[in-house]
Structures are given as structure tokens and as C-alpha cells.
Image (tube, rainbow, N blue to C red):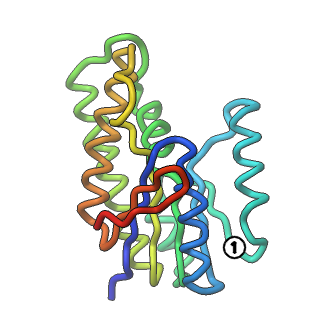
Amino acid sequence: MSGRLVYVTGGARSGKSTFAENLVMEQGHKILYIATALPIDGEMNDRIRIHRLRRPSFWKTLEAYKGIKAKLEGEGIKYHGILLDCITIMITNLMLDGGLKGDKPDSKQVNKVEQNILKEVMETLKAIRTWADTGIVVSNEVGMGLVPDSSLGRIFRDIAGRVNQAVAGEADEAYLTVSGIPVRIK
């Protein structure tokens, strides 16, 4: 039997992570938090530290942005809730793994990387549904701001937008957070 999937999106500092954390806490005591961020610099280290301090000590944490399906299958534990935070950082890491760098990446390479990202995300969603009663996935809404001034930035925005559409399409429920207020959109 497949678990429920909830998608939470919003802009930067919109309250999406806090809303998702509160939502997953309502699911029970057996919670897995999947953190996709890498500690690449001092600022990211600070963000990771703050997120760690916010989480209850009884939550289990998996720090991963790829191979999540295999990791969940490997441990074989059914959770009350799994919270993945966040898809857009996962996309960034997978883009870099795919070699997308520089000013103007080749369009064939971009398409291949996007397909690999979409495959990884969809496999992750399926695994979350399998191994949790409720899975909650957080992502940034990146299409409501300025158009990025770099080619790579526009590629990221486009890939993230298409991945977000796919995730929202798979979700049983979807929320948009605006100024700390969650609005149910699906």
C-alpha cells in the first residue's frame, strides 16, 4: 500500500520548511528527515546547523540527495512520516554531478541531465510513498521572481519548474506558503 504524498512549495523564507516540519510531527514519532544540502561553505554550514537544532532529537536524519531509494530499501524501516527538504537543493547537486557548469552548456547535455534529475526525483517519491505513511516534500517556487541573468541560472529555473510540476502532479496534497501562511492548492 502506498503512503500519502504532500508537496510544500513557496518562495525563499516563506515558511515552507517550518510548515512541513510541523505537518510531519503530526504523523507520529517515527520520523525520517532527508536533508539534501551539502555543507559547501560557511553560510550553508550555518543553515544546516540551524535546521538540525530545530529538529526533535528522536527524528532520524538521512543526509543524501541521490540514491535515496536504495538507502530506504536498504534499511527497510517503515516510518510514520518522511520529510525531504528540499527538492531544489537536490536539483542543484544533481546538476553539478551531471557536469552542468559554465556560461552555455550544450543543450543535449542539459536535456540528459534534466531527464536524470527527473528520474532520480520520481524514484525518490516512489520510495517515500513505500516507506512512509505520509511523505512530505519541500521545494522552492523559483518561477515567480526575476529572470536569472546567467544561462546556467535560467537552466536551473527551467529544470526546477518542470520537476516541481511533476512532483505536484504526483502529490495527493499541495501547499503554497506565503509569508508564513500555508495555502492548500491541491
Which residue is painted at 45% across and 44% down in the image? 88
Q: In the figure, is residue 154 to the left or right of 75?
A: left
Q: Nearer the viewer, residue 146 or 96?
A: 146
Vertical placement of 186 versus 122: above or below?
below
- Residue corresponding to mark 1: 59
- Position of 3 compared to 18: left or right? left
Q: Give the total of numbered labels.
A: 1
For the residue pair 171 and 103, the one nearer the viewer reads as: 171
Q: Residue at image x 51%, y 70%?
A: 72
Relative to 30, is 87 on the left or the right? left
Q: Quadrant of residue 51?
A: bottom right
**In this rendering, is residue 98 above or below 67?**
above
Secondary element under disc 1, as helix, strand or loop, is loop
Residue 170 picture location, percent across and down: 26, 65
Indicate the quadrant containing the N terminus: top left, top right, bottom left or bottom right. bottom left
Q: Position of residue 139 (x, y in %)?
A: 44, 51
Going by the picture, which residue comes out furthest to the top?
A: 103
Seen in the picture, residue 60 relative to 49 is either above or below; the reply is below
What's the residue type where badge 1 is placed? Trp
Above-or-below relation of 40 to 65: above
Quadrant of the image containing the C terminus: bottom left
Query: Residue 20 appears at what percent x and percent y?
Result: 54, 65
Question: Residue 127: which quarter of the image?
Answer: bottom left
Residue lying at 46% horizontally and 30% vertically, measured from the top left: 96
Q: Residues within 10 Å of mark 1 (few under 14, many from 20)?
A: some
Find residue 159 and report its horizontal and vertical position in percent.
Answer: 30, 37
Residue at 53% over, 66% down: 83
